[in-house]
Amino acid sequence: MNCDGGYRIGTILNNTNDSSNLRSYLRLQYAITSEHGSWVFLLSPLLIGLFIGDTFTFASFFLVIAVLAAFLIRQPVTIAVKAYSGRRSRADLPGARFWMLVYGLIGLIALGGLLIEGYAYLLALAIPGLPVFAWHLWLVSRRQERRQPGVEIIGSGVLALSAPAALWVARGSMDPLGWWLFLLTWFQSAASIVHAYLRLQQRELKTTPPISERLGMGRRAMGYTTFNLAAVIMLSLASILPTWLFVPYAIQWMETLYGTLRPAVGFKPTRIGIRQLIISTLFTLCFILSWIAT
């Protein structure tokens, strides 16, 4: 009886350990990035390309899955690099490896679908992402990945390549319009990143500075959004872009002007991030509607 009791207790403990290990693998910190703002830099170009393409095919489905898998795998790989460089416990490695395997397999299946559908040329769009990702991991290993606006702007350019990819898959060919969508979405993302850094800089102020100092702090952010708005207006007047496409860029320009004149003194980063998310979402919706309405 003691032997049977000991066997049952051992079995229960083993099952409990297995369940605990499974739960540790399923922790969100291994699977989903904590940088929630990065989602908009992925989804905005992707949605714009899909909607302007005006057709959702099996290839479009495979593309969305492949793009999401490539984006999500960044989190477990980053955790693994932190573990190997001593920034995190080696106990995090099994969970990180599990999600690397999951996202890797999903990505390969989706990629296979794209190849079968005849879109092998889309692989070229992934090439710029490799050195940028390697650069990010190198910074992670040296504890230098935070407050790197240059890396973030270049990284947003890589994510903006999902716009032409989505358009080309929808239309079945490499429509030159795809490169316009790439530039339009990348420049918007770059302006948004610069504006976010302005707001984070402002939150460290003790009091609201004089107007001249506020304008000086916001000069770079205003320069980005002013360039974007002016360029879109001129291209629209030249009948290269839709007539009403200036509207989303005007919204971003006004937000940057407001942020320059009304500093985020003492704001929490979460408050800044939520407002950025709202403006970026509004930009995406207005971009799509402005294009479709023309």
Image (cartoon, rainbow, N blue to C red):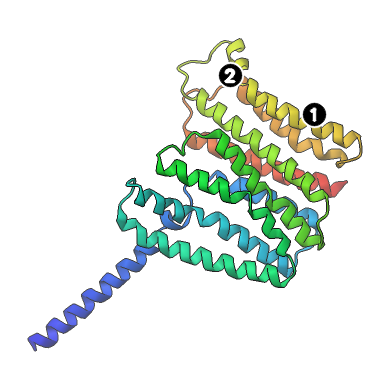
How many dots with numbers? 2
In this view, the residue in front, 228 or 79, is 79
Task: Report if residue 50 is visible in the image.
Answer: no
Which residue shows up at 49% across the image and 37% down it? Answer: 270
Q: Is residue 223 above or below residue 9?
A: above
Q: Is residue 237 above or below residue 8?
A: above
Q: Amino acid at mark 1?
A: Ala
In this view, the residue in front, 235 or 36, is 235
Q: Earlier in the sequence, mark 1 or mark 2?
A: 2
Residue 42 coordinates in the image, percent (x, y): 62, 49
Residue 71: name its quadrant: bottom right
Residue pointed to by mark 1: 230
Name the secondary structure under disc 1. Answer: helix
Q: Residues within 10 Å of mark 1 (few under 14, many from 20)?
A: some
Residue 153: name its quadrant: top right
Which residue shows up at 82% across the image and 46% down it? Answer: 291
Which residue shows up at 60% across the image and 70% down it? Answer: 109
Which residue shows up at 69% across the image and 38% down it? Answer: 188
Distance of label 1 from label 2 (alpha carbons) = 21 Å
Residue 45 coordinates in the image, percent (x, y): 69, 49
Task: Report if residue 218 is visible in the image.
Answer: yes
Viewed as shown, does residue 271 lie left or right of 59? left
Residue 135 coordinates in the image, percent (x, y): 52, 44
Residue lying furthest left: 2
Q: Amino acid at mark 2?
A: Met
Residue pointed to by mark 2: 217
| Pointer 1 with pointer 2, Cβ within 8 A | no
In this view, the residue in front, 159 or 221, is 159
Q: Residues within 10 Å of mark 2 (few under 14, many from 20)?
A: some
Name the secondary structure under disc 2. Answer: helix
In this view, the residue in front, 29 or 290, is 29
Q: Is residue 227 above or below residue 174?
A: above
